[in-house]
Amino acid sequence: MQLGSFSTQKVISSGFANEIITPNVGLQLAGFLGERKAIGTHDDLKVRVFYMSLSNKKHLLLIVFDLLEVPREFSSKIKATLTKKFGIEEDKIIISATHTHSGPEIREFSFKVDKGSDELQFENGEKLIEFLKEKSIYAVSKAIKKSTPGQLEFGSFLMKNKICGNRREQEDPQKVEVKFLLFKGHDGKKALIYNLGCHPTVLHESNVLYSADFPGAVEKHLLDSIKNLEFVMFINGAAGDMSTRFYRKASDFDEVKRIGTILANEIVNNINNTEQVLNENFTLESAIRSIRLNLKEPMPPEIIAGLEQKASTDLEKARANNPVDLRKYEARLEGIKFLKLSSDFLNKNRTINSVLQLIKIGNVAFVSIPGELFSSLGHKIELELSPLKVILVGYANDYIGYILDEESYKKNEYESFTTFLAKGEGERIINEIVSMKDMLTFKEKNQ
């Protein structure tokens, strides 16, 4: 359907922009325990902005940082500023992170418990936070100024050459789906948003250079390969248990390029397999909801000590036997160490408050998740919201850690050790999202 078939009240315009956010060297890199100071830059980190407006003054704004996470206080301040400066409602702004483990830590890894607070709070680097905020607001202003009429298309495909899968199951039969939105401006310019649930952790703790990891390589290859493409945004999805662990051949920049090239080529091969998602009567509706989640019971120190001893012994045995993959043993030990660090917080808090968000535009639904959602829960959301085309936005608006399905709590693995949430809270998040969808459906029917 061409844009001309829209009624005068349904014209869409979009703008897009990015800004480099690579900070000075010497900052702690996020994502792994222990000191890891950046000594340089391999490829620049960016904040990317995609803006859409309708002629009836409704707006949609997606902001993605090449960072590990976006704390709630950080995203809330940016949203408030954008609402004041540009008049965009906060429930139509989603701010997320790619979850690169080669970007700066924006809050120090030390738990801070305030009486009367039910949010996870951390000490942060105020200068870095302000720098990131200013860069994002400037990118938004550029995107709005560049806004141009056009049409939005949706596509999806199953990867033929698998680059990632369930990192806890080496023989993972699960198909990996990539979804994408392609904006085609009437001026010929294009913007691409692709959605995949996968830890961007080809690079490991030995890396001390700033990098976007494989999504940076994907962006470069796509910009070089697709005519008139000017913008690429990666939205990480249900990546809690998904990574390149069993599919990468190394943890260096050559491997980043190899994996990035595979994914980019598959996107290029499917770029013309799209469908219109904005029919003549489409609407843009949104909902945002606070949710109070129960925290798991803290584990007694003596049990943690026993688990740590066993994990250390298992790791040493594995090293002696030279297995192909040591990462699962290392991750298990890291998870137990994290469990020790979080015990004080869990002892003093029984609930945590976070936020869920749903934006529906035409047949597409953006579902924001404030952490690392397991792929099984992501699939349930897609089923519950069907036939909508669901874009899961992980690491969005807040960061509350791993969000597991009930079955995964039975396994003594990294994610079950490090999650803050009580068993069953992942399923409760799904129920809340379904409730939000039902509310938007009712609202549409009664407009």
Image: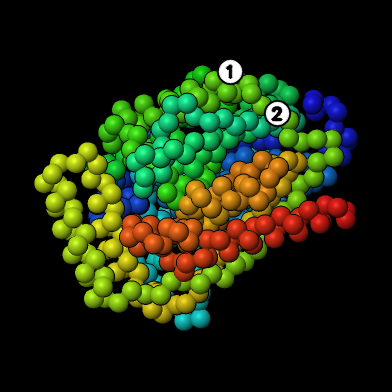
Residue 227 marker: 1
User: How many other residues sit within 10 Å of disc 2, few (<14), some (14-19) or many (≥20)?
Assistant: some
**Identity, as a three-letter code, of the amino acid under mark 2:** Glu
Number of on-image labels = 2
Say what amino acid the circle numbered 1 marks. Answer: Lys
Q: Is residue 14 visible?
A: yes
Tell me the quarter of the image containing the N terminus: top right
Instruction: Report the side of 225 relative to 153 (left or right).
Output: left
Residue 393 visible in the shown view: no
In the image, is residue 383 above or below residue 110? Answer: above
Q: Where does the image place residue 314, in percent across and percent down from the top left?
A: 18, 55
Q: Is residue 413 left or right of residue 431?
A: left
Residue 169, position as x, y percentages in the image: 36, 45
Mark 1 secondary-structure assignment: loop
In this rendering, is residue 324 above or below 292? above
- Kind of element beneath mark 2: strand
- Color scheme of the displayed model: rainbow
Quadrant of the image occupied by residue 249: top left
The residue located at (24%, 66%) in the rendering is 307
Q: Residue, x 48% and y 22% (percent of image)?
A: 265
Say which of 155 and 73 sits in front. Answer: 155
Give the labeled residue for mark 2: 275
Q: At 28% across and 63% down in the image, what residue appears?
A: 336
Characterize the local packing of mark 1: few (<14), some (14-19) or many (20 or more) Cα atoms within 10 angstroms: few
